[in-house]
Structure formats: C-alpha cells, structure tokens
Image: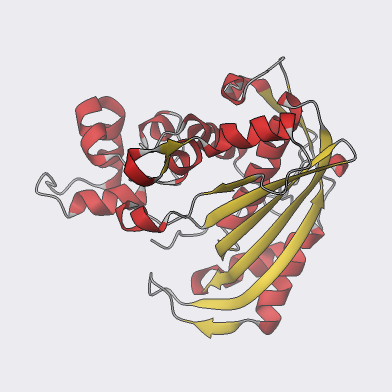
Amino acid sequence: MKQYLDLCRLVLEKGKLKTDRTNTGTLSYFGHQMRYDLSEGFPLLTTKKVYLPAIIHELLWFIKGDTNIQYLTKNNVKIWNEWPYEAFKKSSDYQGETLEEYVEKVNNDNEFALKHGNLGPVYGHQWRAFDGPNGIHVDQLQNVIDQIKNNPSSRRLIVNAWNPAVIDQMALPPCHMMFQFYVNDGKLSCMLYQRSADIFLGVPFNIASYALLTMMIAKITNLELGEFVHTVGDAHIYSNHFEQINKQLSREPRELPQMIIHGNQKNIEDFKFEDFELVNYNPHKGIKGKVAV
C-alpha cells in the first residue's frame, strides 16, 4: 500500500491548513490519484489493522439499497452511528440517551429504528433507486452491470451518488460520490471520484470497499480483474490524526492479503457476508482515531 502512504506524505509535506464543517481543522491537499492493480492482491492497509467485516457489511448494505443503520448496528458496524444520533438528539423524543443507549434502541425496537435510524437517501438509495423526475427511480447499479455484460465498450458505465435535488435530505452528502467501470482486454477496472477524503479513517475503507465491489461485479460478468483507480478531491488529515498518520509512516508495509469469494453468484444480490474469505492478512496493530462529525 505504498500508494496510500505516498498520499499521507504528500498531504503532510504540501497540504495547507484549512477549516472544515466539523471545526476540527485539517491539513488539506486538492487533487490526487492512486492506482491499485487488483491482480497483485487485495488492497487492504497493512500499516494498521483495518476492520474488514465493517467494510463488507457496509458494501452489502449499499447494494441492498438500504439507508437505515439497523442492519449495520445488528452486525456491530458502528461507522454510521454518530450522524443519526446527532439528529435524534435534536428531536422531541430524545430523553438524554447516550450513543450506546440509542444504538440499543435501534437494534431492538423496529419502530424506533424506522423513525430515528434512517439516514435519508444516501448511497444505497442513489445506487439502486436514484431519484429522477416525475417520481422515476433508476437502478443505476443494475443498469451498469447489464451494460458491462451487453455493451462492455461503453464509456457510460457510471454510478452517481451525488443527487443535488436531495442532498439536503441526506444525513451526510456522499463523499465517494461517483464511480465508473472500464472493460478492456477481458479485464474490469473501476475508477472512483471522492470529493472529500478523510485519509486516516475513511480512505482505507474506501479503497477496500470499491476494490471488493469491482471483484464482485467482475465475478458475475465473467471478467478478470484490472485496476482500482482512486481519484480524490479534498484529501485531508484531521488535526487530531497527525500522530496516527505518522505512526503508520514509521511502519514498513507488509505483503497484501488475498480475497477469496466463495460461491457461484450470478447476480449482485446473491452475495452474502459468509462468501468472503480474506487470507494471509498480517497487518501491524490497529490505531484508534476519533471520527469528526
């Protein structure tokens, strides 16, 4: 994962101080691209342990078109909890519940989860039911898969999560906002454009998630693996993550693991959590960092 560490160094060396929505403060650099050859291994960070189950469950959640955190919380995935919790705290139903108590209610009370666990029309909704005019909903993900199978030379293999008409209804506007597939020489590649890239916490998840999505689609379209290309706009290190980033830079990257996808899936909805097996993952110890909300 030299590409990721090079991004860390670039932002530390050339980034500029910049204020942000969370008032945490960042060191920011605009415009960078990384390339990962997926035939060389699964691009999961080795300079710190990354919690892969959260990545897999979140991706399956996107693919389902789900926008309620209950599926995630029931599978011990905590990465989305803060945003609906902050909204809940502003509601008349809030009775001083802690974040942990809020999550417990989401897990065990379907009515509460329906009312206070929804994030609005975020990623999964836009992937599977993009809001068009006159109430039309477009399944962008399935459309792209069909095009890959039937018209692989198309330059329109795009899924766009940035829908200006409903941005203000989302708990958090999409950071990884658009991705495009590319088929050549029997190989499937994917390029992601990410408008906002939290280098310590977010980017390792994003790299692994879109690499895995590419593998899944390659499998159901009978293609070999090409590259994952990651293009970022505002690449930033939060001011409370400098120590964590420098700790990673002091560590030597290790050999990439391999991802095995078991089963004979034909459709994108056929994949289950149990189908994925990561082998030969030998990372350095995990490093904790606080998310900026």
In the rendered image, the quadrant that contains the N terminus is bottom right
Q: Residue at (61%, 26%) from the top-left corner?
A: 268
Residue at x 57% of width, y 36% of height: 141
Tell me which residue sits at (27%, 54%) in the image. 86
From this view, report whether residue 212 is shown above or below residue 79: above
Q: Is residue 119 visible?
A: no
Quadrant in the picture for residue 209: top right
Q: Position of residue 203 (x, y in %)?
A: 61, 56
Q: Is residue 40 left or right of residue 91?
A: right
Q: Which one is in front, 139 or 223?
A: 139
Position in image of residue 233 (x %, y %):
60, 69
Judged left or right of residue 9, residue 235 is left
- The percent position of residue 208, horizontal first and vertical second, equals 67, 45
Q: Residue at x 72, y 75 (%)?
A: 10
Q: Position of residue 213 (x, y in %)?
A: 65, 37
The quadrant of the rendering that contains the C terminus is bottom left
- What is the basis of the colouring in this image? secondary structure
Name the image quarter holding residue 111.
top left
Say above or below: 166 vs 56.
Answer: below
Q: Residue furthest right?
A: 185
Q: Quadrant of residue 237?
A: bottom right
Which residue is nearer to you in this view: 177 or 92? 177
Residue 142 in sight here? yes
Is 59 on the left-hand or right-hand side of 21? right
| 81 and 68: which is toward the camera | 68
So how many labels did they put on this image?
A: 0
**In front here: 181 or 265?**
181
